[in-house]
Amino acid sequence: GAVVSQHPSWVICKSGTSVKIECRSLDFQATTMFWYRQFPKQSLMLMATSNEGSKATYEQGVEKDKFLINHASLTLSTLTVTSAHPEDSSFYICSATPAGAGGPGTKNIQYFGAGTRLSVL
Amino acid sequence: DAKTTQPTSMDCAEGRAANLPCNHSTISGNEYVYWYRQIHSQGPQYIIHGLKNNETNEMASLIITEDRKSSTLILPHATLRDTAVYYCIVRLRMGAQKLVFGQGTRLTINP
């Protein structure tokens, strides 16, 4: 099956610093990737939709200047948490859909990374 | 996307069939039912999806009622590794559609 790799799996940083999280589709191309955030005992909340070669689309209430998304290639999207603060501590998860998904004969499945646990001190 | 309703939690004995219900009474004709699960501290995993016919794969079976207003995910022989939160999501199949996650059902498989 399709594999999405997310790195790092766990990161601790000091308040005020920036952290970059990478999401790679290893065996397929993804024109669209998604970034989610999950707080303890809560469900996944979509933060933004990342489109290759264009600006990301952010969900309401998500600060685009704080959560920078870059999708420079068909296999890589990055999320940078700028000037991180303790309230940004969370589990960040990316997902990717194979290019052309949704077309005839495809399943249109989103494949998820293993997640990145961010702790801001 | 149509809203779904799932029980908050369920228990099942190891080796037995786990039947997870989902209500989606406002589903539209071109929306599919997708099931994902999330094992603790991992990313969600796709399980199965369907439109109106029953579906089966190596992981599970999906039974959709004739009026499509509800469905049941069946894990035929549950193991301890099936303990997870199971999400029922209704969405269009076409295009790169985002997934909107509800609270899901926390399934605990007991030895």
Image: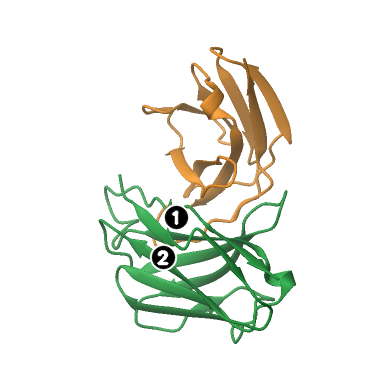
Chain colours: A green, B orange
Within the image, what quadrant is residue A25 found in? bottom left
Tell me which label, 1 or 2, sits earlier in the chain: 2
Residue B39 left/right relative to A120: left
Residue at 68% from the left image edge and 66% from the top image edge: A89
**Residue furthest toward the bottom?**
A65
**Disc 2, SS:** strand
State the separation of the CA atoms marked 1 and 2.
7 Å
Residue placed most toward the observer, B92 or A54: A54
Asked if residue B50 shows in the view, the reply is: no
Residue at 51% from the left image edge and 56% from the top image edge: A115
Give the amino acid at mark 1.
Answer: Gly
Identify the residue under disc 2. A23
Within the image, what quadrant is residue A58 found in? bottom right
Residue at 52% from the left image edge and 20% from the top image edge: B79
Mark 2 residue crowding within 10 angstroms, few (<14) / some (14–19) / many (20+): many
Residue at 26% from the left image edge and 47% from the top image edge: A105
Q: Are the residues at dot 1 and dot 2 in contact (C-beta closer than 8 Å)?
A: yes
Q: Chain of mark 1?
A: A
As drawn, the label of residue A78 is none
Residue placed most toward the observer, A73 or B104: A73
As drawn, the label of residue A113 is 1
- Name the spot of residue B98 as percent of width and height, x first: 51, 61
Where A59 falls versus A111 (above or below)?
below
Where A26 falls versus B47 (above or below)?
below
